Amino acid sequence: MKNSKYKIAYLSFFDPNDKKSNSGIQYYMQTALHDNGNLVDLYWASGVLVRCGLKILHRIYSLSHNNAKEFYSWTPLYKFLGLYFSIRLFFSFKKYDFIFTSRGSHLIPYLKSKLPLIYTSDITFDLMVKYYNGFDNVSAKMKEEGDFKEHSTIQRSSLCIYPSKWAADSAIDYYNAEPNRVVVIPSGANFDINDIPASHIISANRSSKSICNILFVGRDWSVKGGDIAFNTVKILNEQGIRSTLTVIGCKPPFNDYPSWFKVIPNLDKNISEQNQVLSNYFVNSHIFLLPTRHEAFGLVFAEACAYGLPVMGTDTGGVPTIVVNDHNGYLFDLTDEAVVYADRIANIWKDETTYARLSHNARMHYEKVLNWKAWGERFQNEIQRVI
């Protein structure tokens, strides 16, 4: 199409307008599509009838299955959702250029539509089963059904978009996606652009180096490496480097907090006041630390880069797409203990030139790559190639 503007049917299981849904991915993707001049109609599993249908299906499933996780890889669910979205698209009486879905491989296998499909996800089903804890005991039936829905969606897609090479390689190597129909486009930071202050304002807030304020944001203390982060800051204080650790999004398994430790269990980005509180913590911190054990991509690292924070993460999953060693932060081995993190942070904190370089590069990585405007422009260019 010469004008490169499209009519898009956006399919989602969850409400794409909810900033809490899929860490805000749905909201910011559909906003990026709109911002590029496309007409985007949202179709998600809303309404009394579909919710009743899902409850009935779940009740039937529970009578013969023990593993709740396997419900979302259950063929009757795929068929129900395929029928539901097929009916909604048919009776919309609208003509679309293509269907778009993010993390919606369970919506597609039984969808009746001849429209081209654009699919995006941060992980494949095979990677999820092999990578994340809790999936090592899945039944052979679940694995078969999960692979079926993933393979069906990938093979049906005119374009598959992944935020990391790690996930893209899995689509090609395990699900036999054609390489020319798979692209890597890193996701953006999930903050509205007006929430992110200019670089000079952030720098002014960090001019004082009397205390090193370290930020940790994640929903699962154990999975995100909370113990390592806590012990890292404990070591820094023991070494005479005055440091604080602020944890947002989860609670540690202990209640006796030292004076340098603060916990905010939850902040809702849908509530403007709480979103501003979260933004302020990014502004007033000096270093972002997340020794995550498992991470498909790590959007919070992109958010830290938006605020010019040197990022400390682990070399796992899709994290290396965001954290580039000695450029905008450092990657650590999964086996590294807190003392390794503490030594690295201490060296950065004592070297103003290194700190300034990492901070500047983090912000530049956001401005050039890790933002939704860049994602939308890359998306638009790729669509012109395949549609």
Image (cartoon, rainbow, N blue to C red):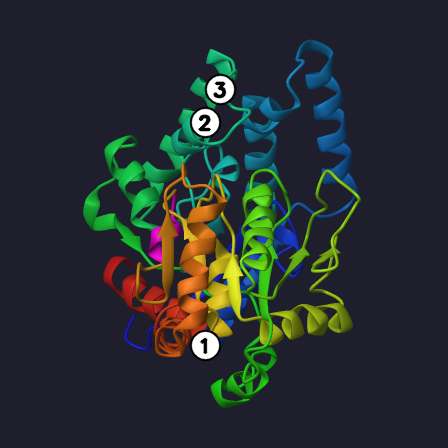
Residue 270 relative to residue 43: left or right: right
Q: Amino acid at mark 2?
A: Val
Residue under label 1, please give it: 37
Q: Amino acid at mark 3?
A: Asp
The Cα atoms of the two marked residues, 1 and 3, are separated by 44 Å
Residue 53 in which image quadrant? top right
| Secondary structure of residue under mark 3 | loop
- Of 259 and 192, the residue lying toward us: 259
Where does residue 342 sit, x and y in percent of width and height?
47, 54
| Secondary structure of residue under mark 2 | helix
Where does residue 307 sit, x and y in percent of width and height?
51, 74
Which residue appears at 34% of the width and 52% of the height? Answer: 320
Q: Residues within 10 Å of mark 1 (few under 14, many from 20)?
A: some
Q: Which residues are magenta?
A: 317-321
Where does residue 23 sit, x and y in percent of width and height?
59, 54
Residue under label 2, please give it: 129
Q: Mostly what secondary structure, the magenta segment?
A: helix
Residue 136 is marked as 3
Q: Earlier in the sequence, mark 2 or mark 3?
A: 2
Single out the mark in the foreground, 1 or 3: 3
Single out the mark in the foreground, 1 or 2: 2
Quadrant in the picture for the C terminus:
bottom left
Q: Earlier in the sequence, mark 1 or mark 3?
A: 1
Which residue appears at 78% of the width and 34% of the height? Answer: 52
Where does residue 263 sit, x and y in percent of width and height?
73, 55
Q: Residues within 10 Å of mark 3 (few under 14, many from 20)?
A: few
